[in-house]
Image (cartoon, rainbow, N blue to C red):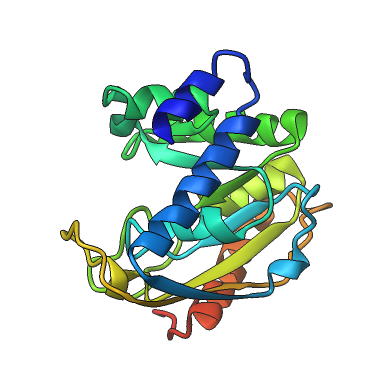
């Protein structure tokens, strides 16, 4: 699938075909690993709509689960180091995913502005995991404000997404998928029209509370 995706990038500069290959790969991966799944709230998303999607992050399995169930054109923000890995990095870049330089506030802000422009111009959705990385103990950590800022700057609805038991299927540090059931719960889209960057803290807190609720966890105060 990765080879087909990379080949398709030679004529598909928008990454639409590559996204289709990624969704297919995700579905096959879950089936081969005997991972059952259930989804609620997916009907709240317009397949032709554009969103900033915000989810908790406890496992590498989160990405194929999100790709399998969310019916919109998705791009991810990925840490900069992944783009330097041969083949994987080529695929990420040619698919239209965006680099995030952790620990560099200026570079991160630039990436967010580029992401906002990408959303508006190409009519795509982006997925962010605002905890800043996978949670080591499975508890959802307070969110970094970048996702809220991006949603406000792009002017599109932001959607909270709760993922359940992905860590149980693929624990941190393991490469072995365990049979089981994962859940994905999509919340109501939250409009951002009329909001300004000054509203990002309040929106960020709202998103954190919503994602914790959807994932069945208690928020950290």
Q: Position of residue 91 (x, y in %)?
A: 42, 27
What residue do we see at 47% from left, 85% from top? 216
Q: Position of residue 122 (x, y in %)?
A: 73, 30
Q: Does 112 appear above or below 207? A: above
The foreground one among 185 and 130 is 185
Q: Position of residue 187 (x, y in %)?
A: 66, 72
The foreground one among 202 and 51 is 51
Q: Is residue 42 left or right of residue 33?
A: right
The foreground one among 195 and 213 is 213
Q: Position of residue 41 (x, y in %)?
A: 69, 74
Residue lying at the far front of the rendered structure: 32
Q: Is residue 88 left or right of residue 137?
A: right
Q: Does 54 appear above or below 208? A: above
Q: Is residue 215 left or right of residue 194?
A: left
What residue do we see at 50% from left, 33% from top? 97
Would you identify the image quadrant in which residue 96 lies?
top right
Viewport quadrant of the C terminus: bottom left
Q: Is residue 113 visible?
A: no
């Amino acid at each position: 699938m990765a080879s087909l995706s990379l080949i398709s990038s030679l004529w598909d500069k928008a990454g639409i075909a590559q996204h289709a290959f990624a969704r297919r790969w995700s579905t096959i991966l879950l089936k081969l690993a005997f991972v059952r799944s259930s989804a609620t709230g997916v009907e709240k998303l317009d397949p032709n709509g554009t969103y900033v999607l915000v989810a908790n992050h406890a496992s590498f399995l989160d990405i194929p689960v999100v790709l399998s169930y969310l019916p919109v054109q998705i791009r991810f923000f990925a840490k900069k180091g992944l783009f330097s890995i041969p083949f994987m990095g080529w695929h990420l870049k040619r698919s239209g995913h965006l680099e995030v330089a952790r620990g560099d506030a200026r570079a991160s802000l630039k990436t967010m502005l580029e992401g906002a422009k990408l959303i508006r111009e190409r009519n795509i959705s982006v997925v962010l995991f605002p905890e800043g990385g996978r949670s080591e103990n499975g508890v959802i950590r307070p969110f970094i404000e970048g996702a809220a800022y991006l949603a406000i700057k792009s002017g599109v609805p932001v959607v909270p997404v709760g993922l359940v038991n992905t860590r149980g299927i693929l624990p941190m540090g393991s490469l072995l998928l365990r049979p089981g059931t994962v859940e994905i719960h999509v919340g109501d889209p939250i409009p951002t029209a009329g909001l300004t960057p000054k509203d990002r803290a309040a929106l960020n807190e709202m998103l954190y509370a919503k994602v914790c609720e959807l994932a069945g966890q208690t928020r950290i105060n």
